[in-house]
Amino acid sequence: MKNIPQRISLANFPTKIEKLDRLTKELGGPQIYIKRDDQTGAETSGNKIRKLEYSIKEALDQNCDYLITCGGIQSNHARATAAAAAKLGIGSYLLLRTDDEPPIDGNYFLDKLLGADIEFISRSDYSNYKESFMERIKTELAVKGHKAYIIPEGASNGIGSFGYFNAMDEIIAQEKEMGIIFDAIVLAVGSGGTYSGMFLSNKIRNHNASIYGVNVCDTAEYFQGKISDILKESFTYIDDDIPFTKDEIKIIDGYVGKGYALSRPEELNFINKIAKQEGVIFDPVYTGKAMYGLVTEIAKGSFKNHKNILFIHTGGLFGLFPQKDLFFK
């Protein structure tokens, strides 16, 4: 196997691991820890910057001076891309999904503050044509003398997955320092790249953790297919094929709720409860749903065979602010 691709250093690593003592005691089951990938930076906070370190290195190696990407109006990935581009002195162009003129708030506010070029796209067009829209933007930038690099939604592709390959290696090193083994690692799944990287490292390093994803949109079957595709693309970078089956990709379905970025009262109440109980804030789109799912499954006894669970806190704080009115009705 070749070495994994190189990355550019943009974030604060390693992120620390903390134990959720009071939640662990309340549930009376496995020990619950969180890895604070919400603290990878300020402007670049969250899991996306790990992937972007690899995507942007590839872009710079190709002499690109513009980054194009897409996401929802409150996309953490889009904001992290805009922040990374500003830090590096290159351009960013964001294709943001919305059917209405949005208030300038949360991640969208930061996108504008960071100087990103922004274009809106309807939800229906986003589903069917986002790739062709980004190709059109790339062509338009070329006419203006720029060479652009397209990063897919969530930087969830072969090169981006190495961000969480590296994170898994980081966790293995922290296990040795802490004298603990995490036999289960749980994370939100929204585009598949975070899961893919951790799964690949877990395989290659012969680590025996069970990697669980809690999908916040679509279905378990969809993500088993999507993650499989990302893994196969990542193999082209390491010049090796790692045998795996879709059944090894463990997705805990049933916590999508009303749909992507739509919140139920029980999810919002849970976020509020954990904030007061542990001083940790989850977001309503990704980590709130995933942690709610994990806690519900622990209470049901689904994790009774696990001793130490590590939840990956993938960030999303800025996405809370546009939904603040939902919390205190």
Image (spheres, rainbow, N blue to C red):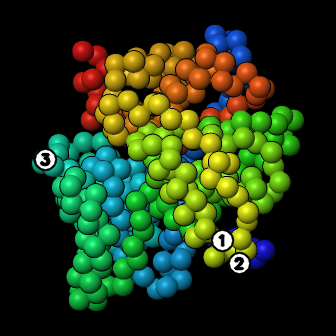
Instruction: Answer whether labels 2 and 1 touch (C-beta < 8 Å).
Output: yes
Check disc 3 and report its element: helix, strand or loop: loop
Q: Is residue 38 visible?
A: no
Foreground mark, 3 or 1, reads: 1
Q: Which residue is mark 2?
A: 239
Amino acid type at image mark 3? Asp
Q: In which quarter of the view is residue 316 placed?
A: top left
Q: Is residue 146 visible?
A: yes
Q: In which quarter of the view is residue 69 placed?
A: bottom left
Q: Which residue corresponds to the image point at 45% horizontal and 70% vertical from the top-left?
A: 88
Q: Is residue 169 above or below residue 297?
A: below
Amino acid type at image mark 2? Asp
Q: Which residue corresponds to the image point at 64% horizontal and 13% vertical from the top-left?
A: 27
Q: Which residue is mark 1?
A: 235
Q: Is residue 145 above or below residue 34?
A: below
| For marks 3 and 2 on the same chain, the one whose residue lies earlier in the sequence | 3
Viewer-nearest residue: 26 or 245: 245
Q: Quadrant of the N terminus?
A: bottom right
State the separation of the CA atoms marked 3 and 2: 45 Å
Q: Is residue 226 above or below residue 276?
A: below
In percent of width and height, residue 94 lies at 29, 63
In percent of width and height, residue 142 lies at 28, 87
In percent of width and height, residue 207 lies at 81, 49
Q: Quadrant of the C terminus?
A: top left
Is residue 143 toward the left or the right of residue 41 in the image?
A: left
Q: Which residue corresponds to the image point at 66% horizontal and 24% vertical from the top-left?
A: 302
Amino acid type at image mark 1? Phe
Q: Which residue is mark 3?
A: 100
